[in-house]
Amino acid sequence: MTSSRAAAAHAIPLRPYPLGRVVAAAALLILFLIGVTAAVLLVSYEDTVRQQKTTLRNLAIAFSAQTFNVAQAIDSAMGQAEREFAAQRGQPVRRGAPAAPMALIDVGEDSLGQQLLRIDLYDGAGTLLASAVPPGVVAAPLSAPALRAVLGAPAQRLHIRISDIDRPGGRGTLVFARALHERVGGRGGRGGSVVAQVDPAGFHRLYGMVELGKGGSITLFNRDGTMLVRGPNFSAGIGRSFAATPLFTRYLPAGARGVAAEPSPLDGQLRLYGYDTVGGFPLVVVTAIDRADALTDWYGRLWMAVASLLLIALTVSFLAWRVRRDAGRQARLIGELAASEARAGNSAAYLAAILNAVGTPIWVLDNARRIVMHNDAFSRFVGRGAAELVGCDEAAAFDPAGAAARARRYQQVSHGAEPREAIAAMVDGAGAPRTVIQLSSKLLDAGGQAQIVSVLTDITERQNAERRLSDIANFDQLTGLPNQGRFRRLLEAEVASAAASGASIGMLAVSLERVQEISDLLGHEAGDSALRQIGAVFAALLPQAKAVARIKGNEFAVLVEADEGRAGLAAYAAALQQRLAGALLVGGREFYLGPLIGVAMYP
């Protein structure tokens, strides 16, 4: 420590940098990262659920269309049987006479095939008038209870039910029935019915074509809530009514097609549903998947985000602990300085030994802003010798850029204000930019004159670490391109801007299918080198492209203007595909990336 005179015997009222601010800043940063991560995960969760619901609804629509084709074929066969019977009605029907045979309409293997077991016509009393049975099929007429249920059904619409259920196998016979257009038998009374019996095996094969996971299913219901067919088979539910479930009490009354998320009435598990009614028929197709299966990919992203967040939180906590430790050490040393000064009186050498032990720059100014005291750390910081600094004006020895702001702060401290601190950017004696916290306090010399003592805390490395964390959160570390999270935010902003201005934008999702071959053949470093070269190719698309990003692994995305329409966007995609289809030189060998490009356009 160098001084123009011995230090006064008065204690120096230095105040250390408040450590609570370091902890608070670190806590706020961690809370901010937690909030951002939670928001991103929530958006991702909602997108995943929405996409799964949309997929289930579309699947229900597709199977509803297939079911409509089969049901329409059955209804057509029933109509033709009725017309054939009407043509033959010139023949008198005698009570007790055997049923008249009819030719069965060929409905085709693609639409119905061998599912149709037989078609029967009954009069109003339940007497079998005529039958049509496919060759090689053995099927009995309806049982008496089933026939009574058919004859008792409303005559104004098609009636569909399931009968003769085999409980162990969970199979029955589907019965399609509707009233004849005219009364039969030549005697008044109730009109007759045309009845088709259908083997549901074809529906089981149709609904088994798609695998929806352990708890997933595709189910055909009657509009009254009766389960008719389910894939995979659920024997206990066939023929059972589910009319009291939310699907039939809340969702179907609100819309003939839609999605739902409800506990299953079979096992109570929460499932996602899509449903669609079969047009013109009292049938509903319902697709379902366990929510846990639907969210499998999202859970993977969740754990990765949690692991990354924990790593970042540990890093920030460690840095805060280091700053707190250093600041606490500084505070203890300054406290020891004050106590030692009181004990040592005018011993400048004793004071110098203590202050020079502090690695933080400390200097004292008189009321003319001349340096009267400083430690070795201050000399090193400004890059000048001790002899040059004593008596030197601070503005000449220190970075002059912030002289005006420091002068105002010193004026406030000199007039009795509390110690002041400020964060400032300055250049040290070596010309290196630094970010520091300057804490200035007032003290009195031996003559009672006000002096200013200042302490610098260098936080350059801490800020660099914070910027590094921000880069990790927003940019891919291998290519330097924006990562998926940042690209999502850019995309949302561009979509909002396009919606407001009426512009069009396009997005190209690029998958380089053969990048992994480079790592497999030449090693991980060669794979990284290839990705850096690919990243440079995408970076070169700027500024013509609005944004480019590495989404994950070998997948990249490009956001461009699309005011020229689909043709312009297609031409841009073709040009990019040709550019990426060329050979990539890595380790003296040529590799072809096999680019695949998906294109989307808004609006």
Image (cartoon, rainbow, N blue to C red):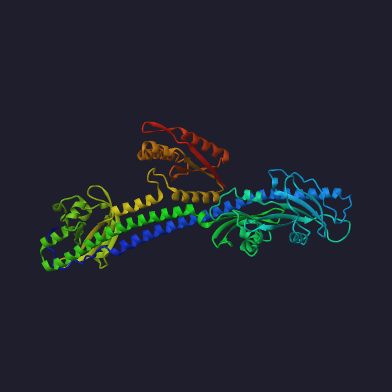
Which residue is at a point 39% across and 60% down the rendered structure image? 31
Would you say 206 lies left or right of 455 here?
right
- State the image coordinates of residue 147 (x, y, percent, origin top left): 76, 59
* x then y, percent, for residue 257: 64, 55
Which quadrant of the figure contains the N terminus?
A: bottom left
Decide if residue 446 is in sight here: no
The quadrant in which residue 457 appears is: bottom left
Q: Which residue is at the front of the view, 213 or 318?
A: 213
| Relative height, residue 116 to residue 356 (above, below) | above
Q: Nearer the viewer, residue 516 or 586?
A: 516
Q: Nearer the viewer, residue 6 or 207?
A: 207
Relative to the observer, which residue lies in front, 243 or 434?
A: 243
Q: How many marks?
A: 0
The residue at 81%/48% (across/down) is 101
Task: Please state the horizontal and vertical placement of residue 64, each as a whole percent of the image.
Answer: 65, 51
Q: Is residue 186 left or right of residue 160?
A: right
In the visual, does 481 lie left or right of 274?
Answer: left
Q: Which residue appears at 27% of the width and 67% of the height?
A: 418
- Residue, x 75% and y 50% (percent of image)? 118
Q: Position of residue 395 (x, y in %)?
A: 23, 54
Q: Is residue 245 among what the camera can see?
A: yes
